[in-house]
Image (cartoon, rainbow, N blue to C red):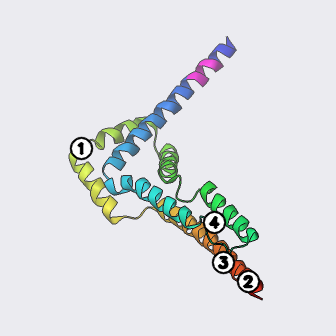
Amino acid sequence: MRYLTLLLVFFFSFISANEKEDIIIDIFNSMMAGQPKVLEIPVLLKQEREELIESFRPNYNDSTTSENIIVLQERLYQDAKNSNLFLGFMDGLRNEYINDMNEIFTTNELYELRNILKNKLIVRLIKMEAETKENNFESRWSESNNKLITELMERQQEILKLRLEDLENSSN
């Protein structure tokens, strides 16, 4: 009997946790619907990622480039492709939102909040706020990607220096 009671308590707490997260996701989606600029970000980031990674592609047509330099360029190119550069923005934003909401609100409060967010005036207010407020997560995420870009570009510069040294040595 004791195990059955524990099992029921665990089952209902699990359902409650999932229900709470579902409500938070619904609220998050409502908030994002009021911020079309945020929804455009993943498309722009995908394009930026592809263009930046392509800039690291080795030039196999240049006969003056040594094999060592090409190997370094290939490694840099693969590292850039395998990196998290410009990835995970929406997932990270949603996860942070879920964690924050989960800590602050009870399930009943989340139900109330979801109903409030359906009010047209609140929807307009959300749109206005989105245009004037910068999110901390976005700043940290952008800073992280800028740091990664800087590191990749520094490596590319080092490779170019080695390539120039190889050219100078081969001309001597």
> Which numbered circle lies on residue 160?
3
Q: Left or right? Give the position of 81 relative to 65.
A: left
Question: Label 2 belongs to which residue?
Answer: 165
Question: Label 4 belongs to which residue?
Answer: 60
Q: Amino acid at mark 2?
A: Glu
Residue 124 included in the magenta stretch of the image = no
Question: Label 1 belongs to which residue?
Answer: 119
Is the residue under label 4 in contact with that under label 1 (CB below 8 Å)? Answer: no
Give the magenta range.
6-11
First along the sequence among labels 3 and 4: 4
Q: Position of residue 44 (x, y in %)?
A: 41, 58
Q: Amino acid at mark 1?
A: Asn
Would you say residue 98 is visible in this rendering?
Answer: yes
First along the sequence among labels 1 and 3: 1
Is the residue under label 3 in contact with that under label 1 (CB below 8 Å)? Answer: no
Q: Nearer the viewer, mark 1 or mark 3?
A: 3
Between marks 1 and 3, how big is the CA–CA gap? Answer: 58 Å
Q: Position of residue 41 (x, y in %)?
A: 41, 57
